[in-house]
Image (cartoon, rainbow, N blue to C red):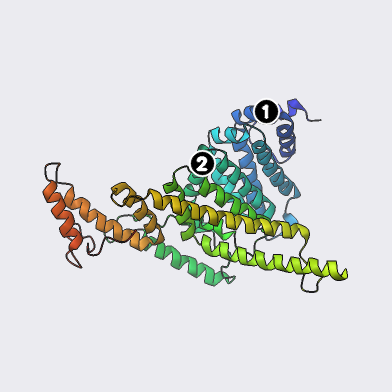
Amino acid sequence: MISKNRVSKVLNGGEFTKSAALDIRRAIEKGGAPFIEKFCSHNGFSKLIGLLVECSEEDEINEDDSTNLSLDSVFAQLNCIACIRAMMDIEGGIQAVIDTKHSLENMCQLIKVAFSESDNTRMLSQTIDLLAATSLYSSEGHLLVLDAFDELVPWFEEVLVPADASEDDEEEEEGQEERKEEKSQHREDKNGLPVDQIAGIRFAALISFLDIDFDVPVRLSVLGLIIGITSVPSDVIERMYLREEMCCAGLVECLDENQKAAEEMLELYDKQRRQLDKSGEESDDGNVSNDTAIMLQKVLDLCRLYEDGTIADEVEDEEEYDPASLESVYHRLERIMLRSSDASSAMCDVMQNYVHKLSPLGPDDEDEMLMVIETTGSINGGSRGDTGTGSGGNMLMPV
């Protein structure tokens, strides 16, 4: 039985200790919503994340010496994730997490720990499940998850490497330096002004976990989060923008690979079952367990669900698109420009040229405004004008 005094002492104290993690977990599971409310009011969620980070950093320090790896840290990590999961499984738990004072910082730390320790597939998949649950819970939760991925873009760029990265440390270090230098060049235009990077980068790390070398449970969790992120917004424009970001981060290719791999393994499973029914012996071509087959079917179903959702959104988006509406054209153009940071920068130059020439004109200068639009749009490879922008020729593109 858990000592209430002991738990209260932990809550009212400073940082959580490893030994306290199990007591907190049991208290959450038994105390329900009332305890979670008290827990969050005492900054318990932030302290829980802090303990998780502490254990992760300790493991990182000792990763070269397995004899120094602390079992206490491992168990504390598992208990921390179990605590968070228990909170979110209880009615009102997710809202309590969202309402926590440092909710964005906590969410960022949670993602960083899980993504940094991708070898710990259980923690990774459960963390992604928690993100999916938060995203699906409400528009507020959805926004919190998106904000966390936004906040972590610099960390994604500097820390994470692709799943298929070279194992040669020296080559990788050189490649990272070259990429950093290349990024710094793209971040500034010729006038030294910052240029926004392709927005898909915030989802690139997440989508990298769809690589078929990762365990099936991890890929299932990632697919669930992707579907949650792209399906919650009520506005089809926002859903299509998020889908375009995912596409820019390589989602389509990953979905194709996962579907193909799942279909091949399920075909092997069917062959295995037929031979077992016929001869009583398993096939020599491999062995796919029932549990694995069930998970692979879920992977296949989720891939198809995402594709069906994309098709439905494309149809709705096309029905709502109004080429005579500046706002409608702008939203589609903004989405298209996600596909290339260079094209986005060039389009900004073109549009800035219009802004520069049209800004001085007032409501009574309609004829002059029309003339500026027509002449600027008809220039083909001509002068960049006073703003030093690119050619306005052929600026109108099919959308």
Q: How dense is the environment of label 2, judged by Cα within 10 Å: few (below 14), some, or many (20 and up)?
A: many
Quarter where residue 314 is shown = bottom left
Q: Say whether residue 243 is left or right of residue 186.
A: right
Q: Residue furthest bottom?
A: 284
Q: Secondary structure at mark 1?
A: helix
Q: Up-down: is 7 above or below 59?
A: above
Q: Up-down: is 46 above or below 35?
A: below
Q: Up-down: is 367 above or below 247?
A: above
Q: Which three-letter amino acid code belongs to the residue tagged 1?
A: Phe
Task: Please state the horizontal and vertical placement of residue 254, each as a whole percent of the image.
Answer: 56, 63
Q: Say whether residue 342 is left or right of residue 154.
A: left
Q: Which three-letter amino acid code belongs to the residue tagged 2?
A: Leu
Foreground: 228 or 300? 300
Q: Residue at x 51, y 41 (%)?
A: 144
Q: Say whether residue 377 is left or right of residue 306.
A: left
The number of numbered discs placed on residues in the rendered structure image is 2
Task: Please state the horizontal and vertical placement of residue 325, each as a whole percent of the image.
Answer: 29, 48
Task: Please state the horizontal and vertical placement of residue 194, each as a whole percent of the image.
Answer: 33, 54
Which residue is labeled 1 in the image?
35
Q: Up-down: is 82 above or below 371?
A: above
Foreground: 259 or 202? 259
